[in-house]
Amino acid sequence: MSRLSPYLALYVSGGVGRIRYLAETESIVAPEDPESPVRDAYKTDPSYERGKMVIVLRRGSIRRLDREIPIGANKSALRTHRFFRLSSFASARTVDDLR
């Protein structure tokens, strides 16, 4: 991800299958960066992949959506990062409706 969007929608997998949270972003940093919240633990984390970056969320900004947004017909819609207008979250019935 080369540009930082002001917000990040958080999709919950594992049986939920919905966008459940929205948070404000602060920065993108390398895991070993002094500003990284994972700098002390990333090397032992099994999900760590060399070259990946960390998106830092603004403290206290994570909000649960009043109406969660399910994946929709396009099951691969969230396999990569995508950019949507914040206003489209208000009326979206599924991820397919986000623009």
Image (spheres, rainbow, N blue to C red):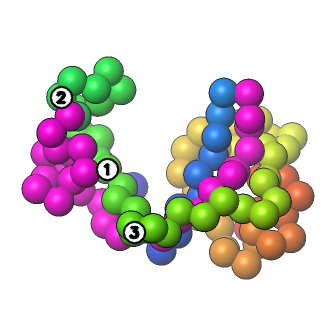
Of discs 2 and 3, which sits in the foreground?
A: 3
Horizontal and vertical percent for residue 26?
A: 35, 70
- Amino acid carrying label 1: it is Val
Label 3: state its secondary structure.
Answer: loop
Q: Position of residue 73 (x, y in %)?
A: 87, 40
Q: Earlier in the sequence, mark 1 or mark 2?
A: 2
x and y percent of residue 52 in the render? Answer: 29, 41
Q: Residue furthest front?
A: 60
Question: In which image quadrant can residue 74 be found?
Answer: top right
**Where is mark 3, residue-wise?**
58
**Amino acid beneath label 2:** Lys
In magenta segment, residue 33: yes
User: Mark 3 or mark 1: which is in front?
Assistant: 3
Left or right of 44, for residue 67: right
Circle 2 crowding by C-alpha within 10 Å: few under 14, some 14–19, many from 20: some
| Residue found at x 66% / y 59% | 64
Range drawn in magenta: 15-41
Residue type, mark 3 in image = Arg
Image spot of residue 67 (x, y percent): 82, 60
Q: Which residue in the structure is indicated by mark 2?
A: 43
Q: Secondary structure at mark 2?
A: helix
Distance between mark 2 and mark 3 Cα atoms: 23 Å
What is the crowding at mark 3: few (fewer than 14 residues within 10 Å), some, or many (at least 20)?
Answer: some
* Disc 3 to disc 1, C-alpha distance: 13 Å
Left or right of 1, for residue 36: left
The answer to which of 28 and 79 lies nearer the viewer is 28
Pointer 1: residues within 10 angstroms few (<14), some, or many (20+)? some
Residue at (31%, 66%) from the top-left corner?
Answer: 27
The quarter of the picture where the N terminus appears is bottom left
Dot 2 or dot 3: first in sequence order is 2
Q: List the residue tagged with mark 1.
A: 54
